[in-house]
Image (cartoon, rainbow, N blue to C red):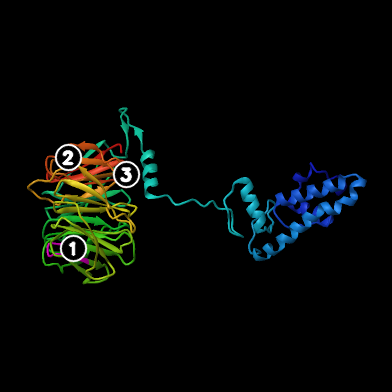
Amino acid sequence: MASSDLTVDGVKKLKVVELRAELKQRGHDTKGLKAALVERLEAALREEEKPAEAAPEAPEASEPKVQETEQEKPKLKRQREPTPEAEDGGQVATTGSEEKVRGEEVGEPKRTPGAQLVEVKRQKTLAEEYRASSLSVVRVDQNGVRRLSSLAAPIMECEGHGAEIFAMKFSPDGECFATGSMDKQIFLWNVKGDCENFSVLKGHKSAILDLHWTTDGKYICSASPDKTMRVWDTYKGVQVKKWDEHQSFVNSCCPARRGNPQLFLSGSDDGTCKMWDLRWKRSAKTLQDTYQVTSVAFSDQADLVFTGGVDNVVKVWDARKDDEVLYTLRGHSGTITGLSLSHDGSFLLSNSMDQTLRIWDVRPFAPKERCTRVLSGHAHNFEMNLLKCAWSADDQRVTCGSSDCFVNIWDVQTGGLLYKLPGHQGSVNEAVFHPREKIIGSCASDKKVFLGEVDI
C-alpha cells in the first residue's frame, strides 16, 4: 500500500515491517510491539490530516510522544536480551513499561523480559487438591448408585493377616496402603480394583505396633515390641535399616515430613524418644523421659518433637537441644495412645485412654490455654491397645480407633460426632482418611481391613 493512500482505518492491516517503514519515513520511533506501532502510526496520520491552521499546534501535540520514547529507551537497554517473536516471524524488542501496560489492559499474567508468555499458577494446597480430586470421582455406577470414590464397591473388605491388625496407613499418593499385624508382617495392598495384597515385608520378631510412610512414599518405618525400629524400601520390598538401641518395647514411630537426610522418631517403654538419621547406624539424639513413651510425632518443620506417655501428659521438646522440654500439654487423665499433627502443622490431635480426643494449638505464639477442642464418643477397654488418631486431608475432620468396634468421625469446627460406622467385630485399632478421595480405612483386632466411601 502506497504511503499516499494510507488511512487511519487501514493501519491495522499492515504488517510489523510495513508499520516500521511508515513510522521511519515520518521520523517516529520504530521500537515496540505491533499494538504500540499501530497506535503510534494512527496518531501520526491524524496529525497529518488536521487543517493547515492547526499546523502550528502540531509540535506541542507530538511532545508527549517524544517524551514517552525517551522514557522507554533506558528500560530498553536493561532488557535487550532475547525478545519475543513478532507475527511475521521477526524479532520485536519490547520494553518493560509496554509489557506492563499490555498485561494490565488484556489481563495477561506478567512475564520476565525475553521469555515467552507463560501463565504462572499458584500451587494448590493439599486441602484444595483433596477437594478437587474428591469432586472429580463423584459418579453414578451401572446400578444407579451415587459413588464418591474410585473403589470397586462402596465398601471393600481385605483379609490376609493371621492375627490382630494394629496399624494402617495410606501411601502419600493414595494408590496403596500398608497394614501391620500381630503376625509380625507388613502387608502392602492396592486401593483400586480388588484391593489385592501385592507385597509382604518380613523381618520383625514380634508384632507391628505402628508404621508410617515417608513423604515421598519410598520408605515405610515400623515399630515393634522386638525392641527395634526398622525402615523398608517399598519399591524393592526389602529392609534397608534396623535400629536396636532401645532396651524395651518400641511403641511408636514417625518420619519427618521434610528434610534431607530423612529423619525418624521412635518412642519406647524404656522411657526414651530417639531420633534417627537414615544414613547412620546409631541414633542421632536421645530424649530421656521419666515414664514410658507410647506415642511420638514431629512438628511440621521437624524442629519440635511431641511425645505422649503413661503420665497422661503431652510433652513438647526442642529437637535442637538435649532433654529440654519447651512446654507441656495437660488435660488428659489417661495414657496417651496416639498423636497426629494436622497437615498445615498448626494443631496436634491426641487420643487418650480417658476416652477423649483433644486438639491442641501448637503454633509458636498460641494462647496459654492451647486445648481448643475436646471430642468424645469413642471407647477404650481392658485390652488397653494403643489406639491411633488421624486428620482428614483438608484438616476439617478427625477420626480415631475405638474398642467398641465402631469407626468415629468428628467435625473439627463444631466438635460434633458426624459418623459412627459399624462393620468390625473387634477393637478398631486405627482409622485413617485417604489423602485424595472420600475414603476412610480401618483395621481391627478381627484381622480385617475395611475401605469405605464416606461423604465428608
Q: CA distance from mark 2 to mark 1?
A: 30 Å
Q: Answer whether labels 2 and 3 touch (C-beta < 8 Å).
A: no
Provide residue 428's location: percent of width, then percent of height. 16, 44
Span colored in magenta:
266-274
**The C terminus sits in image quarter:** top left
Instruction: Compare residues 26 and 192 and report the one nearer the observer.
Output: 26
Give the percent coordinates (x, y) of residue 359: 26, 49
Looking at numbered disc 2 in the image, what kind of residue is underneath it? Phe
The reply to whether residue 297 is visible in this rendering is yes
Q: Is residue 361 magenta?
A: no
Was residue 267 drawn as part of the magenta stretch in this picture? Answer: yes
Residue under label 2, please give it. 406
> Callout 1: helix, strand or loop?
strand
Q: Characterize the local packing of mark 1: few (<14), some (14-19) or many (20 or more) Cα atoms within 10 angstroms.
A: many
Residue at 13% across / 64% down in the picture?
227
**Residue that badge 1 annotates:** 229
Q: First in sequence: mark 3 or mark 1?
A: 1
Q: How many numbered circles are shown?
A: 3
Q: Nearer the viewer, mark 2 or mark 1?
A: 2
Q: Position of residue 159 (x, y in %)?
A: 16, 44
Q: Amino acid at mark 3?
A: Gln
Question: Could you give the CA–CA distance between mark 3 and mark 1, rounded to whole angstroms?
Answer: 32 Å
Assign a secondary structure to mark 3. Answer: loop
In the image, 49: left or right of 183? right
Tag of residue 396: 3
